[in-house]
Amino acid sequence: MSLVKFKRRRPWADLVTSDFFEMDDFFDNRLWERVLSNDNFWNGKNMEPALNIKEDDGNFEIELAAPGFAKKDFKITIDDGCLNISAEKTAEKENKEDNFTRKEFSYNSFERSLQLPENVKEEEAVKAQYKDGILSFKLGKKEAPKKQKPKVIEVS
């Protein structure tokens, strides 16, 4: 079993799955407001960071591109078979001159969730490392149960 991206919402799903889809409703402003309010591009939220997942015999390796953050900005949890990664960063800069004040601020955040397969060792410590804008994880795999020889049953 492999890792699967976990997506909490699908803003266009209502349109595609509806049996009563009509073009008039599609261009209705209320519909666009509802759909675009969940769209990261239109509402000013950041997009989800890119993710690479590798699997070998003993481990899953996950790499997440998150440049510009510090180690302290990340919150990583494993809850009910789901790996949750979030980060939040704020910055504020104020420059006072003789007759004006310039104040700049920024806010950056993201959240990603991955449904873990059953063969991941959740109880074992997950190794995480942040270097050069890449957050890396190593998740150990449980050994597959050994296949037992079939038991022969004699009929009496």
Image: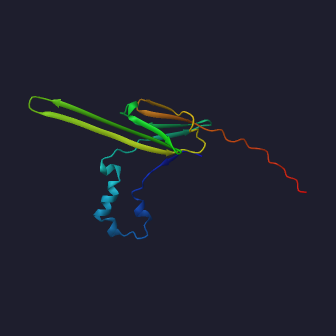
Q: Residue at x 66, y 38 (%)?
A: 143
Q: Count the marks: how many? A: 0
Q: Is residue 85 left or right of residue 43?
A: right
Q: Is residue 13 left or right of residue 90?
A: right
- Residue 58 on image: x %, y %: 61, 35
- Residue 48 on image: x %, y %: 40, 44
Q: Hey, which residue is sitting farthest left in the picture?
A: 99
Q: Is residue 88 left or right of residue 138?
A: left
- Residue 34 on image: x %, y %: 33, 59
Q: Residue at x 88, y 53 (%)?
A: 154
Q: Hey, which residue is sitting farthest right in the picture?
A: 156
Q: Residue at x 30, y 39 (%)?
A: 107
- Residue 109 on image: x %, y %: 35, 41
Q: Quadrant of residue 12?
A: bottom left
Q: Quadrant of residue 2?
A: top right
Which color scheme does this rendered protein use?
rainbow
Q: Residue at x 33, y 49 (%)?
A: 41
* Front one among 100 and 124: 124
Quarter of the image that includes the C terminus = bottom right
Position above or below: 46 against 100: below
